[in-house]
Image (tube, grey):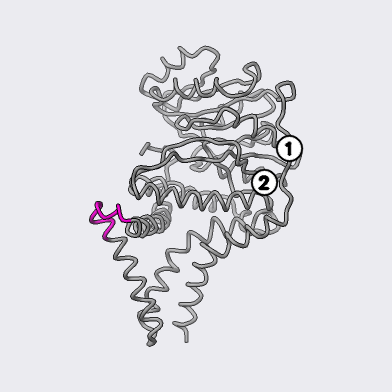
Amino acid sequence: MILLVLFWAAALFILYTYVGYPVLIGLLARRRPQLACPLLDNESLPRLTVVMAGHNEAVRLPGKIANLRALDYPKDKIDILVVSDGSTDATATVLQGAPGVRTLSYAQRQGKAYALNLALAQVQTEFVVFCDVRQDLEAGSVRRLISDFCDPAVGAVSGELVHRPSSTQTGQNIGLYWRYEKAIRKSESRFHSTVGATGALYAIRTRDFSPIPPDTILDDFEIPMQITRAGKRTLMEPQAHVYDTLQTESAAEQKRKIRTLTGNFQTFSRNFWLFSPMQNPVWFQFLSHKVFRLFVPYALIITLFTSAFIPSAFYRLALLAQLAFYLLAAAGHWAPALRKNKFVSFAHVFFDMNAAAMLALLKFAQGRADAKWEKT
């Protein structure tokens, strides 16, 4: 009886996390009216500062600065502020040759959160737009973000990360996961607020910024959630596109995922208010979207082992189905050529993402969380 209860509790938990919650939040979102803010004209647009932090980005910076200057936004209303986080390449030379770009720099690398705190102390404009050096912004993206602040209840607006088509099956499955993730975020945004923002592009009112611990891993989670805690909404604007290239191999994606999930554990440990429905306005979304996924790997283990010991044909079939799935994942790991098969690739990506959650918890428990990110 205990094994039956454990099996079904774990199975239903997995089903709710990956299927039930996305369907439920989608249905709830349909009951809410969409925010309808007109696109602001040039005269109505406020001044803003684009803030970027980077370490050894000399190669990418010229293209990124050109991308920002090509935005459909009045040039006299945009300031660009770049923080060189302990760069040891030609970043300083590149920035010196970029007139109109303000620069902050220091010798010892400290991480993105430290850089953002330093930058925001210098920002004088009403709005600040955060972005990363790597991705390209669509010309009208920033205008669209700022227009959404027509509602005073809006405190942060996130852009939509769009991945360019991948040439590998693994990349396509990672892309499928991101499309699934974005669908959830869009529903959360319409219902009330997303849980965090897209670090590649989001905007806030400068006065709403509060400095974050300098070793923070996920600034794009902590900054918007502090604003949400104050009673304001965090939206995802589906017309504010920012373009990136997908990882083509799951090892690089897993590395990125481990860092992100380690950052989740770091934020959870420092912000217990997140778990209080009295203090967290998006408590339901936070638990269902952010927290429950971290426990799915353990639920998967429970369903596997309990199905092995329940004497019934149904549970034997369930065991065989699970073992077959994990064999596909193992085949994808040990024989990379097999990842061209979409079923093998999907199993491999799914397994790696859940393994990343377990590895992230281990990394955090061992005190190896690092705010400094190495490029993949």
| Residue at the spot 59% in from the left edge and 32% down from the top edge | 141
How far from the left and from the top, in percent, is residue 124? 66, 23
| Residue at the spot 49% in from the left edge and 34% down from the top edge | 112
Disc 1 target residue: 37
| Residue at the spot 69% in from the left edge and 27% down from the top edge | 126
Q: Does label 2 or label 1 sit earlier along the sequence? A: 1
The part of the image, by quadrant, that contains residue 3 is bottom left
**Cα–Cα span, label 2 and label 1:** 20 Å
Of labels 2 and 1, the one closer to you:
1
Tag 2: residue type? Answer: Thr
Of residues 265 and 205, the one nearer the viewer is 205
Of residues 308 and 168, the one nearer the viewer is 168
Q: Is label 1 in a helix, a strand or a loop? A: loop
How far from the left and from the top, in percent, is residue 292? 52, 61
Give the main secondary structure, helix, strand or loop, of the magenta stretch. helix
**Quadrant in the picture for the C terminus:** top left
How far from the left and from the top, in percent, is residue 248? 35, 44
Q: Are dots 2 and 1 in contact, CB under 8 Å?
A: no
How far from the left and from the top, in percent, is residue 303? 42, 73
Disc 2 target residue: 228
User: Does the segment drawn in magenta span residue 337?
Assistant: yes
| Crowd band around label 2 with a 10 angstrom C-alpha radius: few (<14), some (14–19), many (20+) | many
Q: Is label 2 in a helix, a strand or a loop? A: helix
Q: In this rendering, is residue 316 above or below 374?
A: below
Tag 1: residue type? Answer: Cys
Which residues lie in the magenta part?
Answer: 331-341
